[in-house]
Image: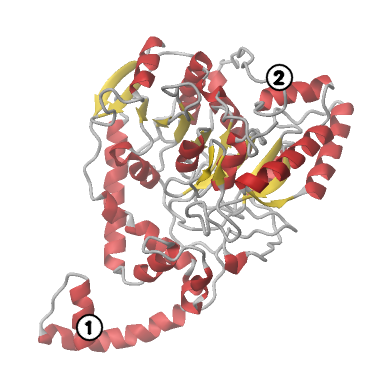
């Protein structure tokens, strides 16, 4: 009875002796039931519960094109003449013209990745045999007149929580550094089918937190003395350094937005359920999302088009149609500006002026006031369940980070979260989804600094899509900050159309870090 009373006190509860007696009997029995659940279970096994951001009675507000819409032609995007920092369409034009072969582009990419890695530590495993075999086959296809589309022959890198058959999938963590999974993640398979050439597995902070993994700390090309943030650390670093036109990252609570902000590069976190996570390490089944990091919003959209849609293997994936931004009219939209998100005189105010110059209407919006931090126990509980055996075996002691906010401590603390509060957190999350839907009744998208107004947490809980992109720096040579654009659920089409148009008008995304040992030549 003393033990139960002490546990109750920790949870902010109190019971009388008359109440405790029957509880102790029941809890003793339940303790044996709990013990029966402590058996090894693969990380890939999901719970029999699926989060959907369109909680009843919500319906999709995503803009759809006219039935007779034809893709709009886009002016060629300006960019560098060489291979470093070139975008997908520029590289594709070189391949189709015969000025460059898929093999030559792959060899250049592998060599540059190997060179910059001595400074940036952005690659865990290079895949030269796989990549060159793909490239040779793709050259043969082009010679025979077969073109798989915009990604044909384009090199890319995968965050090392995506399984690639025959290669290590380390999750950046010491206990799994020798792990080889006998499957390809759905996102990898779909990019293979689209003709993209996988050249490397890229670093991530151990078990998808931060930028420190078992070998090193991944670095920021703008300042290699600083980490690249994470957990999509290597993906953002390699793209920012100009050695990869795109990479895949993932986000549960900032793991695309944060490293893109640190490395001043464009990233897209799609709507929750837009991309299958089959073959990806699970951290939170109700929050994990896979998305591209690229040279521009245009390029990110090309990659999303290749990887989106149901595969029958991830029950969270929606069949909501993905709209090509070129099918939507280039029109002025209503953009919500969260109250107090932009500090007067701050660097982000220039973005508001640029958007108004393009004809968009800016309106102030109020965000939901709900217990956001309380709802986040969802992440702690699910992550602890995903790595239950790691905690119980004591192997969590081998992870490189062991601080108060590191995974080992968070996993242990999560064992004391009450199941009742976990369920109540999901109920508050339902209210949060409905409240954010109300916000989008009057605006097409939001613009905000990356970490302002708790929107990073809110939108990861509600599943809304976000593009993060660099903006103009105050002084020449200064590393540019970034800004976020957040769209309606499943409305990546309009979101990308607006950001593409803004990037074409400003050219902010074309900025490159100062030449140095961690930057492509």
| Residue 270 visible in the picture | no
| Residue 153 visible in the picture | yes
Q: Nearer the viewer, residue 163 or 330?
A: 163
Classify residue 166 as left or right of residue 451: right
Above or below residue 236? Residue 148 is: above
Residue carrying label 1: 4
Percent across and percent down for residue 243 are: 67, 36
Classify residue 95 as left or right of residue 284: right
Q: Secondary structure at mark 1?
A: helix
Residue carrying label 2: 81
> Tag 1 or tag 2, which sits nearer the N-term?
1
Above or below residue 433? Residue 509 is: above
Number of disc labels: 2
Above or below residue 172? Residue 131 is: above
* Residue shown at the point (53%, 59%) measured from the top left: 206
* Residue shown at the point (61%, 36%) measured from the top left: 239
Q: Nearer the viewer, residue 252 or 117?
A: 117
User: Which circle marks residue 247 in the picture?
Assistant: none
Nearer to us of marks 2 and 1 is 2
Quarter occupied by the N terminus: bottom left
Quarter occupied by the C terminus: top right
The reply to whether dot 2 and dot 1 touch (C-beta < 8 Å) is: no
């Amino acid at each position: 009875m003393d033990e139960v009373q002490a546990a109750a006190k920790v949870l902010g509860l109190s019971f009388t002796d008359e109440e405790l007696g029957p509880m102790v009997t029941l809890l003793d029995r339940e303790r044996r039931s709990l013990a029966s659940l402590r058996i090894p279970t693969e990380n890939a096994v999901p719970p029999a519960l699926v989060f959907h951001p369109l909680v009843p009675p919500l319906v999709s507000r995503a803009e759809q094109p006219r039935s007779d819409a034809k893709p709009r032609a886009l002016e060629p995007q300006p960019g560098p003449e060489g291979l470093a920092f070139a975008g997908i369409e520029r590289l594709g034009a070189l391949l189709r013209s015969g000025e460059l072969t898929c093999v030559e582009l792959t060899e250049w990419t592998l060599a540059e990745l190997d060179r910059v890695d001595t400074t940036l530590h952005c690659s865990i495993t290079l895949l030269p045999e796989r990549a060159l075999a793909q490239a040779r086959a793709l050259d043969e296809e082009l010679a025979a007149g077969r073109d798989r589309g915009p990604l044909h022959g384009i090199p890319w890198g995968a965050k090392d929580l995506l399984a690639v058959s025959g290669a290590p999938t380390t999750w950046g963590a010491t206990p799994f550094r020798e792990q080889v999974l006998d499957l390809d993640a759905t996102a990898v398979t779909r990019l293979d089918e689209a003709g993209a050439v996988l050249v490397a597995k890229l670093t991530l902070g151990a078990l998808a937190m931060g930028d420190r993994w078992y070998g090193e700390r991944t670095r920021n090309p703008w300042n290699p003395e600083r980490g690249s943030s994470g957990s999509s650390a290597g993906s953002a670093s390699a793209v920012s350094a100009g050695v990869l036109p795109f990479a895949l990252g993932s986000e549960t609570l900032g793991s695309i937005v944060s490293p893109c902000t640190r490395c001043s590069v464009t990233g897209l976190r799609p709507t929750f359920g837009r991309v299958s996570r089959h073959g990806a390490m699970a951290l939170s089944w109700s929050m994990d999302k896979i998305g591209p990091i690229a040279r521009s919003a245009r390029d990110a959209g090309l990659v999303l088009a290749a990887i989106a849609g149901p595969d029958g293997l991830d029950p969270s994936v929606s069949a909501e149609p993905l709209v090509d931004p070129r099918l939507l009219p280039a029109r002025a939209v209503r953009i919500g500006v969260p109250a107090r998100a932009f500090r007067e005189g701050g660097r982000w105010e220039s973005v508001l002026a640029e958007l108004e110059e393009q004809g968009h209407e800016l309106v102030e919006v109020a965000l939901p006031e709900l217990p956001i931090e309380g709802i986040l126990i969802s992440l702690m509980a699910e992550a602890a369940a995903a790595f239950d055996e790691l905690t119980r075996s004591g192997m969590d002691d081998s992870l490189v980070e062991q601080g108060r906010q590191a995974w080992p401590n968070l996993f242990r603390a999560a064992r004391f979260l009450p199941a009742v509060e976990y369920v109540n957190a999901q109920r508050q999350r339902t209210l949060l989804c409905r409240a954010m839907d109300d916000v989008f009744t009057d605006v097409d998208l939001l613009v905000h600094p990356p970490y302002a107004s708790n929107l990073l947490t809110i939108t990861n809980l509600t599943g809304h899509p976000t593009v993060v992109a660099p903006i103009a720096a105050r002084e020449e040579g200064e590393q540019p900050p970034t800004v976020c654009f957040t769209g309606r659920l499943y409305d990546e089409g309009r979101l990308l159309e607006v950001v593409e148009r803004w990037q074409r008008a400003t050219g902010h995304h074309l900025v490159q870090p100062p030449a140095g040992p961690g930057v492509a030549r």
